[in-house]
Amino acid sequence: MEKTLKKVDIIFEIDKSCSPLAVLDRTLQRPADEIILDLIDSGLKGRGGAGFPTGLKWKFTRNETSDVKYVICNADEGEPGTFKDREILDRVPEKIFVGMTICAYVIGAREGYIYMRGEYNFLLKSLQKKLDDFNAMLTEKGVDFQIYFKSGSGAYVCGEESALFESMEGKRGEPRNKPPYPTVAGYNNKPTVINNVETLVYTTMICHMGPERFKELGTTDSRGSKVFSVSGDTPIPGIYELELGMPLQDFINEFGDGDAKAIQVGGASGHCVPRKKFSDTIIGFEGIPTGGSMMVFNSSRSMYNVLHDYLEFFTEESCGQCTPCRVGCQQLLKGIEAVKKGDKPPAYLNDLKKLTATMKIAAKCGLGQSVGNPFNSIVDNFKEEIIY
């Protein structure tokens, strides 16, 4: 069932009944299995884009017998057009800390890390003071868990969980082969829960409000709400928390400038939706899932230039480890340039689309696998802007 656009305020709410520390105290008194069942019942899926059920991830890690486990918050927000995690880190860091501590209690971890993109280091001074106070409070309460910050160095690929582990271990940030998955062998090859910033805050809020209230928002396939980074040709850019399951048309009615011809849903690695499909496209896991980026383009924008910028970005950020991604990104970029100049016929775009299909199957991680999303959606819907 489609939802109309509904603004909510769960993540950033100023609610005295939701003291994160009070939520932590109450939750640590509950059986761990009960907390997992609440998360599964809530239908919460990862808010970083992949959408894996959070409760199941915690359950799988809890079931591992290792005496060392880790909780990691993925704050390597490198997707172009996404800036919602920065706002969450800045405004409600205690909700992140509490979510990590609850996770540690559930799975049996004693260490947690927040892996933050290097460009956000300007936040570290104030965040470190709040984290030091939080860690001291945990020690006073006899909770055997501590959280630490680790900073990245600006590599987009390190947003992929296994490349993030490699970076944390002091190695080159390159994705690992899967399986094994992080719940079995993650950081330091130990069972690890890695969740997005926003996901961890929602776990705190579900422990506060209960799964039933959370399920009142969204749809059967897309429970709850989502924080969106809105940018581009919009009169009201910024951070907004909206209910999942809304038609894209409702979104553009609220945030468009009256001349929107396309929306890039999910950042550079997401899908470009043209105006004619706004009414038929649902923002959610049953339609087009998104990590949070919503970039609006109006009629003044060249979609060839948009695609060219994306491909330049992917070519630069490919770690180069696997040939499908390393060579594929380069060939896609050179290919659209050749078509634009007339060195290749328009039909060559079909050959390039076949290349994206190969990349989706053969690339080692989400970078190479997702390049076809913007490429195919822009070529299919705005071919005339590439040819002429």
Image (cartoon, helix red, strand yellow):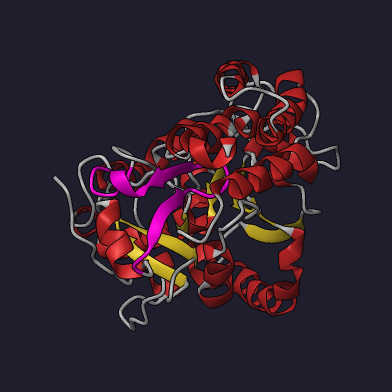
Q: Quadrant of residue 190?
A: top right
Q: Position of residue 249 (x, y in %)?
A: 26, 55
Query: Can you say whether 224 is above or below 25 in the image?
Result: above
Q: Position of residue 125 (x, y in %)?
A: 74, 78
Magenta segment, which residues? 258-284
Query: Can you say whether 250 is above or below 137 in the image?
Result: above
Q: Which residue is drawn at 23% across and 48% down?
A: 279
Q: Where is residue 9 in the image (x, y as percent from the top left)?
A: 32, 72
Report the side of 212 relative to 131 (left or right): left
Q: In which quarter of the image is residue 137?
A: bottom right
Where, quadrant-wise, is the N terminus in this rendering?
Answer: top left
Where, quadrant-wise, is the C terminus in this rendering?
Answer: top right
Q: Where is residue 132 in the image (x, y as percent from the top left)?
A: 68, 74
Q: Which residue is drawn at 36% across and 68% down?
A: 255
Q: Which residue is drawn at 64% across and 39% down?
A: 160
Report the side of 185 relative to 23 (left or right): right
